[in-house]
Amino acid sequence: QVQLVESGGGLVQAGGSLRLSCAASGRTFSSYTMGWFRQAPGKEREFVGAISWIGAMPWYADSVKDRFTISRDNAKNALYLQMNSLKPEDTAVYYCAASKAAAASKAAKEYPYWGQGTQVTVSS
C-alpha cells in the first residue's frame, strides 16, 4: 500500500505557473503507475495526466497538453506536475493517484490510492 500527500497548490494569476508535488510513502514507489486528476466545484473528477512505472512517456488530457508536464523521481518517491500558462478553467482541487497496473489509465476507478488533494486557484 502507498500513501500520497500533495503539496504546492495556491493562488496564481492567469498565465502563471505552479509546480505540484506528490510525496509517496513506502519503498515500492517505482512500481506504481501514477496519475494526476482534478475536480472543480460541481464537476466530476477529471483526468489530467499519468505516467506508468514501466518507463513509457507520460500522456495528458487534451485540455492540458503542451501546458502541463508530469515527471517522477523514484529515488525521492516523488511525483510532480509542472503547470504553465495557467487558465481560470484550471481552477480545481488536484489529486495524485497510484495504481499497480503497468499501463496508465485515465479512469479514476483504476487508481486505488489517492492523496487528499491540493487547491489550485487561477485568477483572471
Image: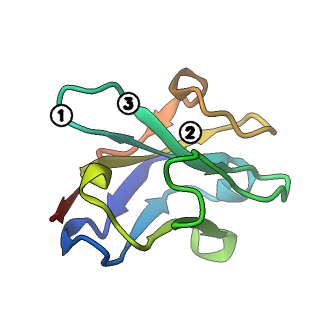
Q: Residue at x 50, y 48 (%)?
A: 63
The numbered mark at residue 41 is 1
In-image side of 68 versus 110 (left or right): left
Q: Residue at x 56, y 39 (%)?
A: 1
Q: Is residue 104 above or below residue 85?
A: above
Question: Do the residues under discs 1 and 2 have CB atoms within 8 angstroms?
Answer: no
User: Which amino acid does the dot numbered 2 rest on?
Assistant: Gln
Whether residue 35 is visible? no
User: Which amino acid does the dot numbered 1 rest on?
Assistant: Pro
Front position among marks 3 and 2: 3
Residue 120 at x, y percent in the picture: 24, 59
The mark tally for this picture is 3
Q: What residue did someone put label 2 on?
A: 1
In-image side of 67 versus 11 (left or right): right
Q: Residue at x 50, y 57 (%)?
A: 25
The numbered mark at residue 45 is 3
Which numbered disc flags the more N-terminal residue, 1 or 2?
2
User: Which amino acid does the dot numbered 3 rest on?
Assistant: Arg
Residue 76 at x, y percent in the picture: 58, 75
Cα distance between the residues tagged 1 and 3: 10 Å
